[in-house]
Amino acid sequence: MAQEPDRILLQHVLISFRETPVEAPRTRAEAETLAQSVLQRALRGEDFSALVREFSDDVAMEGTDRPGTFLVLNHNAPSDGSFEKTIAELNQRAEKYQAELERRIEAGEMGVPEAEQGMEDFIEALRAESDEARSAAGFPRAALVPAFGDVGFRLQRDEIGLAPHDERSSPFGWHVIKRLE
């Protein structure tokens, strides 16, 4: 058996249903039928990114050519440390911004409600940067549902597979997965 690579790039469509943590507006049977349909369309060569945008119940990254994309780090794959460095920098920026808001409140330049809203908006922007950094650095396989990695690491480049819903290994629903790299 061939050794699995340290990292792979996957794109996926999540098809979920009401009784999952995602609580998508369809029954389990409807989700399974839709997942099989999306799989067949993908296997026939339809644009996978278009399928992600149209059908995925996962939050697809906006403003990207390849929504629903994950760099997945295999078990024991080395990390380059870039995500940890980015998080440390974001935390420093948040602390500086918080201090600036406190200074402005004390100086009478803004009220507490305005400062609280400013901090909420700032934190939301930092979360977006954090999500982007995590995507670039990679997600540890162990942090994802088992079926996602189990199917993804079996696929060859440009191959498409299905991780069926399972309470333990794929609790969010069906994942139609394409290996990009």
Image (spheres, grey):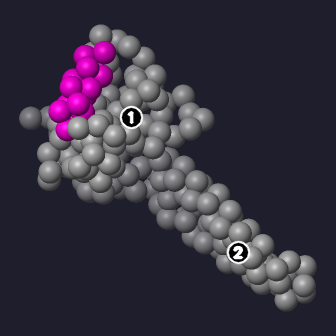
Residue found at x 60% / y 55%: 129
Spot occupied by residue 180 in the image (x, y as percentages of width and height): 37, 28
* Number of marks in the rendered image: 2
Q: Main secondary structure of the magenta part?
A: helix
Q: Is residue 52 left or right of residue 6?
A: right
The residue type indicated by label 2 comes to Glu
Q: Amino acid at mark 1?
A: Ser
Residue extending furthest top?
Answer: 44
**In terms of sequence position, does the residue under pointer 1 or pointer 2 come before the other?**
1
Q: Return the x and y of residue 147 as percentages of the image width and height.
A: 19, 44
Q: Quadrant of residue 48?
A: top left
Crowd tier of the residue under label 1, counting other residues whose Cα lies within 10 Å: few below 14, some 14–19, many 20 or above: many
Which residue is outermost to the left? 1
**Which quadrant of the figure has residue 124?**
bottom right
Q: Is any part of residue 6 visible from this angle?
A: no
Range of the magenta residues?
28-41
Q: Which residue is mark 1?
A: 56
- Identify which residue, 150 or 83, lies in the foreground: 150
Q: Tell me, for residue 27, which label it has, or none.
A: none
Q: Position of residue 67 (x, y in %)?
A: 48, 34
Task: Check the image and report above or below for 22 versus 88.
Answer: above
Q: Residues within 10 Å of mark 2 (few under 14, many from 20)?
A: few
In whole angstroms, how far apart are the C-alphas of marks 1 and 2?
34 Å
> At x 41% / y 49%, what residue is drawn?
138
At x 47%, y 39%, the residue is 60
Q: Is residue 138 a member of the stretch shown in magenta?
A: no
User: Residue at the bottom extreme?
Assistant: 106
Q: Nearer the viewer, residue 90 or 84?
A: 90
SS assignment at label 2: helix
Q: What residue did someone put label 2 on?
A: 116
